[in-house]
Amino acid sequence: MALTGLEIYKLLPQTNCKDCGYPTCLAFAMKLAAKQAALKDCPHVSEEAAAKLESASAPPITLVELKGDDGAVKVGNETVLFRHEKTFYHKPGLFWRLRDTEDGDELKRAAAEADAYHVDYVGIDLYLDGFAVEAASSDPATFNAAISAVKSVSKKPLILIAPSGDLAKAGIEAAAGSRPLLHAANGENWEEMAEVAKEAGVPLAVQAEDLDGLAELTQKLKEAGVEELVLDPGVTSYRDSLEQLTSIRRLALKQTFRPLGFPVITFPGANSEVDETLLAAEQIAKYGGLIVLEEFNPASLYALLVLRQNIYTDPQKPIQVQPGIYEINSPDENAPLMATTNFSITYFSIANEVEGSGWPGWLLVTDAEGMSVLTAWAAGKFDAERIAKDAKTFDVEGKVSHRKLIIPGHVAVLSGELEEEMPGWEIMVGPREAVDINSYLKAMWSN
Amino acid sequence: MTIEIPKEKYTGAVREVTLGATADEGGTRAHTLTIGGESTLPYLQFEGTIPNRPALALEIRDRKPDDWSPLLLQAWGEAMDDPGEWAKAAEAAGADLIYMVLSLTDADGEPNTPEYARAAVRKVLDATSLPMAVVGPGQAEIDNELIVPVAEEAEGERLLLGICEEKNYRTIVAAALAHNHLVQSKTPMDVNLSKQLVILIHDMGLPLERIVMDPTTGALGYGIEYGYSVMERLRLAALGGDQMTQQPMLVNPGEEAWRVKEAKVGEGVPENWGDWERRALDWEAVTAIALVHSGANMLVLRHPETLRRVRSVLDDLLGSQS
Ligand code: SF4
C-alpha cells in the first residue's frame, strides 16, 4: 500500500534544509506521496529510510514477464479486486501444455498448429500466448529435445515444467535466448530450483499445499535472491480456485502481504472431473494470472480469449470499433445503408440485428469517439456535419447506387440538416432500438 | 506462519424471493423456488451464508420459434411443437423453472392473441409442476394485452411475470398484484436505473419480496463486461445495505448468446472459430459462468447441455445437493 505524506515525512531527516528544492521536508513528503517528486532529490535521506520507502512503493503484486524469441507476456501488478474500481491491467496468459513424452514430429506439428492460431475480434488479433512444456519423461536430454522441437516452430514464450534442478537446467539450456517461467519450486527442491532460476535470470513458480506453505517458500526464495515469483496454489476445482485466488488477491491488495504478492498460475484441466473451459473462464474473471490449458480446442479458446478481452477492457475506455463502412450479409449496391456510431456495443447490437435478420446491409460507422448514439449526439460528436464527412471519407456513393441513408431514430432531429449537408440524398429516420431494424426494413425498404 | 484469510463484513444481504405456490398456498406447483438471501459475494462461503442456489431456467416458447439456431432445434426436437411437451422436456433436462416467452405473432405472421397465450400457459401449467415465469414478446402494448389474461389464468400460482421496463410496467405490476404473482424488473445495464425501477414498482404496492431485478447483460464478446460490472456494483451496494439494490438478479445468457453469430451460424465463418456446436455451447456456457460470478441468482438458458454444465459448476461451488 502506498504511504501517506505524513508517513513519508517521518522517514525523512526533518531538517528542512531545502536541498531538495522544497521549503520543508513535509512539503517534499507530500510531493512524494503524490508521485510528483523523486526520492533521489533529497541527498540526506538515510539508507534504511530509502529502503523502506522503496519497498513501500513497490507494487503489491509483482509484475512477472515471460519472453519468447518473439513476443512477451506480462502478468501481475494488478491494483483492484473489481474491474469497475479502475481496471484490470495484465491479461492472464493462456498457455497450452505439451509433454516431452510425445514424439518429436508430433510435438512440432501440434505446436505449429497452435502457433498459427489467430482470430480477429473487433479488429483485435487474439492468439494463444505460449506453451508449457513438461518434462514428463524425467529425462533431461528428452526434455531438452522437446523444447528445441517446440522452439523450432514457435517463438512464443514458454513455461518449463521441470520439477528438479537437472531438468530445469536442461530446459533453460534449450530455451536459451528467451525468458521462460520455470515451474516449480516446492518444499524439497527449492534450493536447486532457486539456483537455476537465479543464474538464468528467469522467473520461478512456487508450489505448496496451502497459502501458508506458499508464503514460507516465497520468503525463502526471496532471501535466496529470486524476486520474480509466480504462485501455484494447486487448485483443482471451481470452489477451491475461487476461494484461494480471491484470498491471495485480497491479502496482496488489502494487507500488502508481500509473501503472496505475486501472480498466480493455474491448470484448469488438471482435474478430469472439471470442465476445463468453464474453470478457465472463472479464472479469467476471478484473479487468474497464467492459465495452462490441457486441451487446445479452437472453439473453446476463441470463447476464452474473447472473455479475457472483455473482462480486461478498461471500463473508462470501452472498446471502439474502427470507423468505416461495414458489410453485412454480402450487400450489393441496392442494399440499405445505415449510419451509427463507433461505440462497440452500439455497433454490435446493430450489426447483430441486421445479420440475424438476413438483410444485406451497409453500416456507416462514424467516428463518434466511442460514444453511443444519444451520448455522442448530446456531446456534438454525432451531428450532420460528421456523418456527411464520414460518408464522403468512406465513399458511400461508390458502394450504393441508391441515395438513401437511414439514421437512428434517436437523432431524428438531424434529418433536415443532413439533407442539406448531403445534397441529393434522402434521409430516412430508422428505429430507435436495434431490435426493431428488421421490422423497420420490412416496412420501409422497398427495392 | 498461519495466514488469516481477509474477510469482509457486510451489513446487508440479498432479499429472498419465492416463486411458485403449492396447493397449500393457493397454487398447483409441486414445490416453491426461493432465490437470493446471500450475505456475501458470489460463492465466498468463508465469509457469509448462501442459503439458496441460483435457479437455472430453461426458456420455452408458446410455439416453435422461427429464428432459433438449428442446434437448438436439434436439441429439443419435436417437443418444440407443443409448449406442454417442451416444458416436460425442459423439466426432464433438469430445469428449476420454466421460463416461457410468448410470441409476437403466430406461425403465419398474424398477431398473437390473449386466448392463445392463455391456453398455452394453461398447457404448461398442466404439463409440469415446476414454478414458472411468463414474459411477453417485448413490445409494450402487446405484452400488456397478453400478460393480463395469463395472470388471471394462473391466479395464485406466483408466476414471475414480465417484462417490466421503465416505459411499461404499470399494467403488468397491477396484474401481478391482482392475481398474486411476481414481476421481472428489467433495465438497461445501469445501477441507478435498476434501483429506480424497483422503487417505482414497489411504490405501486408490490412487496419487494415479489420483485426480481434484471440488470440486462450482453453476450460474451457483445458487451458482457458492461452487464458484468453493473451486476458486481449492484451486489456490492446490496451487501453494503442499499435496500433497493437487494433484489435477486435474473439474467438471460441463453437469449443473448444464441443471438450472436458465434452461436447462431455454422458456415462462412473463420476456420479458427472451430467446431460450430462446441463454439455455440461454449458461448452460452461461458457467458453464463461469467454472470454466475458477477452475482446472478437466476439464469435463463436455452440449451439443455448448457444447463447440465452450469449445474455441475454450481454443484461444486456450493456442494452438491440431491
Ligand atoms: S532535502 Fe531532504 S532533508 Fe532537506 S528539506 Fe528536502 S527532504 Fe528535508
Image (spheres, helix red, strand yellow):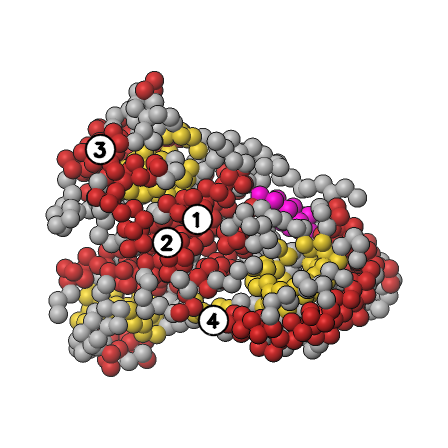
Find disc 4 in the rendering and name its residue: A118
Residue B301: image quadrant is: top left
Of pointers 1 and 3, the one earlier in the residue sequence: 3
Of pointers 3 and 2, the one earlier in the residue sequence: 3
Of pointers 2 and 1, the one earlier in the residue sequence: 2
Whether the residues at callouts 2 and 1 have beta carbons within 8 Å, the answer is yes
Whether the residues at callouts 2 and 4 have beta carbons within 8 Å, the answer is no
Q: Residue at image x 29%, y 55%?
A: B69
Q: Nearer the viewer, residue A136 or A68?
A: A136
Disc 3 versus disc 2: distance between alpha carbons?
28 Å
User: Residue A395: horizontal and vertical position, in percent?
Assistant: 28, 80
User: Residue A408: horizontal and vertical position, in percent?
Assistant: 26, 62
Q: Is residue A217 visible?
A: yes
Find disc 3 in the rendering and name its residue: B123
Do the residues at pointers 2 and 1 share their chain? yes
Image mark for residue B288: 1
Whether the residues at callouts 3 and 4 have beta carbons within 8 Å, the answer is no
Chain that bears disc 4? A
Q: What is the secondary structure assignment of the residue under circle 1?
A: helix
The disc labelled 1 sits on which kind of residue?
Ala
Q: Is residue A112 above or below residue B286?
A: below
Chain that bears disc 3? B
Q: Which residues, given as a range, are shown in magenta?
A: A239-254
